[in-house]
Amino acid sequence: MSKGMPNMGGMGGNMANIMRQAQKMQKEVAAAQEQLSQTDYEGHSVDDFAIVKMNGDKKILDIKIDEKIIDPDDPDTLQDMLIDALNDGMAKVDKDKDAKLGKYTNGMM
């Protein structure tokens, strides 16, 4: 036996192949994450009284509120519409993230 690499029963080639596949997967995941962060999503409340625009990192970019629900005597309705729109937007981000990254994470995200 030579003094170089120990004989691993031919696993050296397999290990190199596994490493190449892992590096390729890392690049694909990074590209998918970058694409998600560059994508804009809209969350809508019931009847579109509140619309929230966010990116794939869930950073709020814009909020639009229909003046019909701005009532100084009823702030709860406005709050509910904003919560509804925010939750809808975040659910859309999560769904897209699962679709794009789920094959790499096996549902762990």
Image (cartoon, helix red, strand yellow):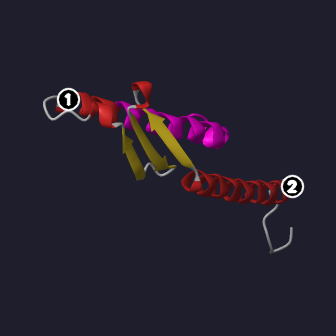
Callout 1 secondary element: helix
Query: Left of 55 or right of it: where is 33?
Result: right
Label 2 crowding class (10 Å Cα cut-off): few <14, some 14-19, many 20+?
few
- Residue under pointer 2: 10
Q: Is residue 10 magenta?
A: no
- Residue under pointer 1: 76
Query: Left of 6 or right of it: where is 33?
Result: left
Query: Residue type at mark 1?
Result: Asp
Comparing 58 with 79, the one in front is 79
Residue depicted at 86% across the width and 67% down the height: 1
For the record, the magenta segment spans 84-109
**Alpha carbon distance from label 1 to label 2:** 68 Å
Which x, y percent locates residue 53?
46, 46
Callout 2 secondary element: loop
The answer to whether residue 5 is seen in the rendering is yes
Which x, y percent locates residue 50?
38, 36
Comparing 15 with 40, the one in front is 40
Comparing 105 with 100, the one in front is 100
Which x, y percent locates residue 28?
70, 54
Q: Is residue 94 magenta?
A: yes
The answer to whether residue 109 is seen in the rendering is no
Q: Tell me where residue 6 sits by quadrant.
A: bottom right
Which x, y percent locates residue 41?
53, 44
Comparing 95 with 69, the one in front is 69
**Which circle, 1 or 2, is nearer the viewer?**
1
Query: Left of 5 or right of it: where is 86?
Result: left
Q: Main secondary structure of the magenta part?
A: helix
Kindly check if marks 1 and 2 are in contact, taking CB atoms under 8 A apart as contact. no
- State the mark number for residue 47: none
**Residue 65 vertical placement versus 21 (above, below):** above
Residue depicted at 63% across the width and 54% down the height: 35
Query: Residue type at mark 2?
Result: Gly
